Image (cartoon, grey):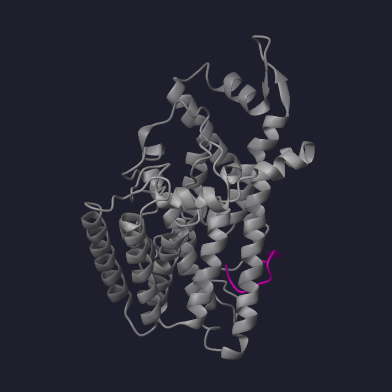
Amino acid sequence: MTNTPAVKISQKETTRQKGSPKGSNPRLLSLDVFRGLTVAGMILVNNPGDWGNIYAPLKHAAWHGCTPTDLIFPFFLFIVGVSIAYALGSKKEQHADHSKLIFSALKRALILFGLGLFLSLFPKVFTEPLEAFSTVRIPGVLQRIAVVFFICAVVFIKTTKKTQFIIIASLLIGYWLMMSLIPVPGVGYANLEPETNLGAWLDRSILTEAHLWKSVRTWDPEGILSTLPAIATGLFGVLIGTWLKRKDREDSVKVTWMFTIGILSVLAGLIWDLFFPINKSLWTSSYVLYAGGLATMGLALCYWLIDVQGYRKGTKTFVVYGVNAITVFFLSGLIPRILSMIRVDMPDGTEAGAQVWLYKTFLTPYFSPVNASLAWAVAFISFWLIILWVMYKKNIIIKV
């Protein structure tokens, strides 16, 4: 997410290795790898063959708690923050260009938000447009990424590191106090239950049930109020990216401090969990610290191994995902919807979408239900790996 036009197909930006164009702003290879790992994880958990047969680590926590799957989204928002620090760090000093930078960030955010809405509308928008718009889910993953990206970009451009830290602390403490102390209208007391917490009430009041998560319609995991601590997750990444980008510190010092900060953040999150439980759907303050600490340590490990020690064997698999992250996330959400529109006659005389036909024809007869479901997800990742590899070889990066 560098300072380029809102949507653009560009020549491949090289990483910190041979071949970087003279005068270019080189990418951080470890960051692309970390982003690629995260996006591949997103696609894996979002595309099982059968939602009723999934291995436990690939499921979200039922409510409170945290599984590996629950770490994927905060890791991505953390990476968004790190990317902002790298992309805008040198431009921030040019105060005359601030308005231009903010406008560019706004354009990107609007495009991301629009792509998220399109996924929610598709394919019904082409067959029943009035129904599609009257029931479209307004929050969503891409929509949250858009909001977090824009606000974090503006905060980074306009404030100091000290102010950014204060904003993070204020968001986390303020959110905790709101969720823990403010009585919920119609309920009469503060609580953290799915349908009766303050965030759920606010989403129903402002967005209405028709525009919330279709699985429940009474609350939304990417709702309005929980976006506040999600912004803190992005700003966490901004601060880590600013530290990692410093040229007056040795790499060993950077990595040591990143591991230290990561460990302390995880411990703080676990302590806060005792009275404000770690919860991905509520994006609780303890969850921000816990996931942010793990993300910091994950990036530190990648940075030390890849950029400092030079262990790059096998990294290209994830780099190709990392440099076209938003593209593959959007298309991986669009293709299953298209496949569901293609109707196929099943052997039992029923009709199903092409994806169901492929799954039941080529996987379910040969694997156990849970392994067939995982095999479909792995095959889906492999399918996109081939496409992304070709794009990478042809120097095609679609920037949003």
Magenta-drawn stretch contains 223: no
The residue lying at 51 percent from left, 27 percent from top is 50
Magenta-drawn stretch contains 8: yes
The residue lying at 49 percent from left, 53 percent from top is 202
Q: Position of residue 209 (x, y in %)?
A: 56, 43
Q: Where is residue 101 in the image (x, y as percent from the top left)?
A: 61, 78
Q: Is residue 25 left or right of residue 221?
A: right
Location of the C terminus (image quadrant)? bottom right
Location of the N terminus (image quadrant)? bottom right
Q: In this view, does 346 lie to the left or right of 25?
A: right
Q: Nearer the viewer, residue 311 or 215?
A: 215
The residue lying at 54 percent from left, 22 percent from top is 363
The residue lying at 61 percent from left, 24 percent from top is 356
Question: Is any part of residue 301 visible from this angle?
Answer: no
Q: Which of 194 and 368 is in front in this view?
A: 194
Instruction: Give the image quarter of residue 352.
Output: top right
The chief SS type of the magenta part is: loop
Q: Nearer the viewer, residue 386 or 145?
A: 145
Q: How many labels does the image show?
A: 0
State the extent of the magenta-drawn residues as a range: 1-11
Q: Position of residue 385 (x, y in %)?
A: 57, 46
Q: Which of 130 and 115 is in front in this view?
A: 130
Question: Is any part of residue 159 visible from this angle?
Answer: yes
Q: Is residue 229 left or right of residue 220?
A: left
Q: Where is residue 200 in the image (x, y as percent from the top left)?
A: 46, 48
Instruction: Give the image quarter of residue 142.
Output: bottom right
